[in-house]
Image (spheres, rainbow, N blue to C red):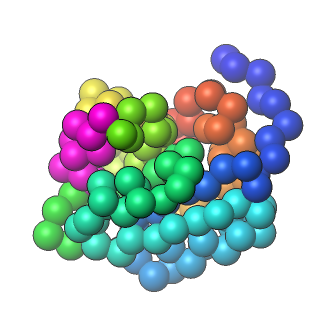
Amino acid sequence: MVATVDINFSNYNALAVEDDAGGIAIIGVMMRYLGMSSYMNTTGEGVVELARAIKPRPSVIFLDLNLPKTNGYEVLKLIRADERLKGVLVVAVTAQDADTEIPKCMAAGFDGFIGKPISRSRFPRQLRRILSGEPVWETY
């Protein structure tokens, strides 16, 4: 377990890929509240291009597993195949069954898992741990 350090969130930015309006609102509001720059994508299309355009590159990408016309696993493959995005943390976010999806996400190469609904009280601690290099694999 990595010791959690004090994080200045304003030094980080994030990309949230989420088609659910409620989910994207929670992530966006929480990141703004923490002082973190955030970018949103609601379809999964063009994620690699958007992530490349963000300067500096995203510190973390929150990636919904269920997206229109694609899924988080396919988007993760595209992210991992891009040399310019090496080292970017990618965390799965889903309401799907955690017992089924966590092992699949680990095998696919995700850096963490946060189950929905996202907890407003726990999300800042989860994000702090993720940015500190501690893996987060939690059902909510």
Q: Residue at x 35, y 50 (%)?
A: 97
| Left or right of residue 125: residue 50 | left
| Left or right of residue 79: residue 58 | right
In this view of the protein, can residue 107 be seen by the observer? yes
Q: Residue at x 21, y 58 (%)?
A: 71
Q: Position of residue 33 (x, y in %)?
A: 77, 69
| Left or right of residue 67: residue 23 | right
**Compared to 29, does 48 lie above or below?**
above
Q: Position of residue 62 (x, y in %)?
A: 47, 54
Q: Residue at x 48, y 59 (%)?
A: 54
Q: Residue reaching furthest top?
A: 1
| Of residues 16 and 11, the one drawn nearer to the viewer in this rendering | 11
Please count the marks in the image. Answer: 0
Quadrant where the image shows the N terminus: top right
Q: Quadrant of residue 5?
A: top right
Q: Residue reaching furthest left?
A: 69
- Whether residue 79 is in magenta: the answer is yes
Q: Residue at x 51, y 79 (%)?
A: 22
- Whether residue 37 is in magenta: the answer is no
Q: Position of residue 9 (x, y in %)?
A: 75, 51
| Of residues 34 and 124, the one drawn nearer to the viewer in this rendering | 34
| Of residues 92 and 7, the one drawn nearer to the viewer in this rendering | 7
**What secondary structure is the magenta-colored segment mainly?**
helix
The segment highlighted magenta reads: 72-83
Q: Position of residue 58 (x, y in %)?
A: 51, 50
| Left or right of residue 140: residue 87 | left
In this view of the protein, can residue 73 be seen by the observer? no
Q: Quadrant of residue 99?
A: top left
